[in-house]
Every structure is written in C-alpha cells, then in structure tokens.
Image (cartoon, rainbow, N blue to C red):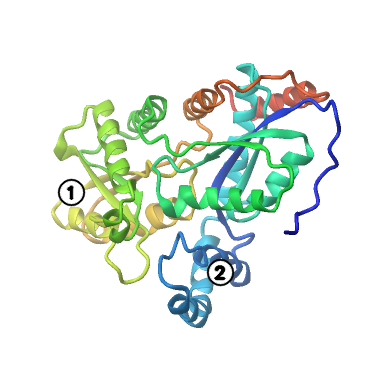
Amino acid sequence: MAFRPEPAYRHGTTPRTALLVVNLGSPDEPTAGATRRYLAEFLNDPRVVEIPRLVWWPILNGIILRTRPAKSAAKYATIWTAEGSPLVAGTAALTKWLQGHLGERGHPLLVRHAMRYGNPSVSNALDALRAEGATRVLVLPLYPQYAAATTASVWDAVSGWANAARHVPEFRFINRYHDDPGYIAALAQSVRDHWLHNGRGRMLVMSFHGLPERSLLLGDPYHCECHKTARLLADALELAPDEYKVTFQSRFGKAKWLQPYTEPTLRSLGTDGLERADVICPGFPVDCLETLEEIAQEARDAFLAAGGKTFHYIPCLNDRPDGVRALVDIVVRHLGGWPVPGPAPGDAERLQRERALAMGAKDL
C-alpha cells in the first residue's frame, strides 16, 4: 500500500490536540465551470446519491452535469460576497471564534476548518494539522442532526485520509448535537432577537434540509432528530402547536422526499390568508445557498405570490456569541480525558492578535 508523504517523526515532540470543523462545501466561484467541479464531487458521493453507480453515472455525467451547473452558478451569484462563498467565509469566521473561546477556556487547540466537498478539503486540512504536530483530532461536522448523507460522509473523508496515512492520529468524532441545550437556547434567542427588532408573526416555519423518504425507511435518524430539535425550540419559545410548522426543503429529483415540503407549505399558507411568515433553518449552523437563496429569495417570492404580505427569514447562528459558546461547550465535553498541553511557541501571540482583530469587528 502506498502511503502519502508525511513529516518525519521527531522524538520528544509535544503532542498537540486539534479541532477540525467540517461543513458541506461550495464552488470556488459562482461560475458554471467551478460549479460543475463542485457538483461532480458532491453528487459522486454514494452517501449522497444511493443509486447503483452503473445507473447513476450516465445520468450524472450525461444530463445533470451538462445542464445544472449554469443554473446553480446563477443562484450562487445572487449570494456571493466580497469574501466569496458565504458558507466558506462564515465557517472560517466561526472557526476563528471557536479557537479564541477554546483558548480562553484553557484549551489551546489547533482549530482549522474544511469542506466535505470543494476547498479547503478535509485531506488538505488534516495534512496541515499533522504538519503542525497534531496527534489527537476531534472532528466537528457542522450538522446538528445526524444523517448518513452528511455526518457519515464526513467520517468517510476522514477515514479515507487515514487509510493512506502511516502515522494516524487519535480521532474523536461528534456525531450530532440536535438536542444540546446550549444549541437550542441559542436558536431560541436568535428568534427572540429577531422578533424584538421586527415584531412577531403568528407562524414560525422551521425548515430543515430534505432527504429522500427512503433514508427514513432504511433507519436514518435524521427525520426524528429534526423533529426533536423543532419540538425543543418550540418549547423554549413557548409556542402552541398551531404556531409553528416543520418542513423540509431542497428536494432533488423525482423521488419522494421527507414531507411536508417547505415551498409548497408556504404557498399554501399564503393562499389560506396568512399575512406574515417567519422562517428559520435550524439544521444549518452557517448561512449558505440553501438559506440565502432558496429560502430568503425563492421561498419568499412563492409566499408573497400566493397572497402573503410579509416574509421574514431569521438568519443562521453563524458566529453569534451564544452559538459559539454552545459549540465550545460541546467540544469541551468531547475533549474529556485528553491532555491539555500548554500553547506551542507563538500560539499565545497569534491568539491575542486574532482576538484583537475579531474584537475590532464584534464585541462579545
């Protein structure tokens, strides 16, 4: 078996602990070419599309990758920022805040981010962590609710990297945090903050990313975990059953997916006379195409066209201080028992600089 090159082993090197934060990914730019490369990687993952390869390959390469990239690139262009992809930039910002807070809590970890598809890749991030001396790595997929198509796919990428490594670090993996009290509290406070500044509607729609219904029938816990998140959030907000709805978005293909679907639900609400809809996406820690374009633009237009008067999208937690603290608490619990070495040379100064830069943009 051929192993990838890695740093030479040095006796006496202080073991270091790292946190790898992993999100879904994004094209490098909002163009058809970049989007095609991204979709080819994403849709080739057998965790994402559970269709036999011999059947799926001609569909993907003969139809989808010829028609979908230009349309998807146009959607990405509507949300692109000066920093690039909102998902990648937002995940990078969240990672910096996590490193700062963990350092303040006495855990001077190496904290890096990666994308399951696209850049920075999981393999490149792990190569960099190993070069920096990481011998223990805690992996945090930014998927609160577990699904084979998301969480397990991150583990596939990590284990695939490890299969070609000679000196494999010690790994720990955070599978889910859908019912974590800090996460629920941060979601609830984000809704309260939105209502404080924008008034309150009489219907809160909680939209989660969809999956084929077949995944539920095969034993995937995702559907149940989404509903538990929604129930806990509704309880925290003291919502009556008729004051919120759970829906699923981002359907792909013609197969039956988890229902009810988000956009048809919003159209129905508008047709039935609901004047205002508030929508939150509790399965997305960082804003992305599915929240900023699919919900805040497409779903909004559908609701208003159906007769609704006002549409409010409540942003993801992103790098909200309470959301960061919730993730820090989760990380610290999963570090239990691992040694906490002092910072490596230069870490204290670097953390201080990053903290000062961050504080210049936002006061915690």
Residue 353: give x, y in percent of width and height: 75, 26
Q: Nearer the viewer, residue 153 or 113?
A: 153
Mark 1 belongs to which amino acid?
Leu
Rendered residue at 44%/55% (across/down): 149
Question: How much space separates mark 1 and mark 2, taking CA atoms?
Answer: 40 Å
Determine which of the numbered discs, if any, sits on residue 69 in the image: none
Rendered residue at 61%/53% (across/down): 160
Residue 349: give x, y in percent of width and height: 79, 22
Looking at the image, do the residues carrying marks 1 and 2 touch, with CB atoms under 8 Å apart? no
Mark 1 closeness class: few <14, some 14–19, many ≥20 residues within 10 Å: many
Q: Is residue 290 above or below residue 20?
A: below
Residue 163 visible to an observer of this rendering:
yes
Q: Nearer the viewer, residue 74 or 140?
A: 140
Callout in the foreground (1, 2): 2
Mark 2 closeness class: few <14, some 14–19, many ≥20 residues within 10 Å: some
Q: Nearer the viewer, residue 282 or 309?
A: 282
**In the current view of this chain or complex, which residue is farthest to the front?**
1
Tag 2 residue = 40
Query: Splitting the image into 4 quarters, where does residue 266 fall?
Result: bottom left
Q: Is residue 103 above or below residue 361?
A: above
Mark 2 belongs to which amino acid?
Ala
Residue 83 visible to an observer of this rendering:
no
Q: Nearer the viewer, residue 250 or 291?
A: 250
For mark 1, give the secondary structure: loop
Residue 293: give x, y in percent of width and height: 44, 56
Query: Splitting the image into 4 quarters, where does residue 110 fall?
Result: top right
Mark found first going from the N terminus, 1 or 2: 2
Tag 1 residue = 274
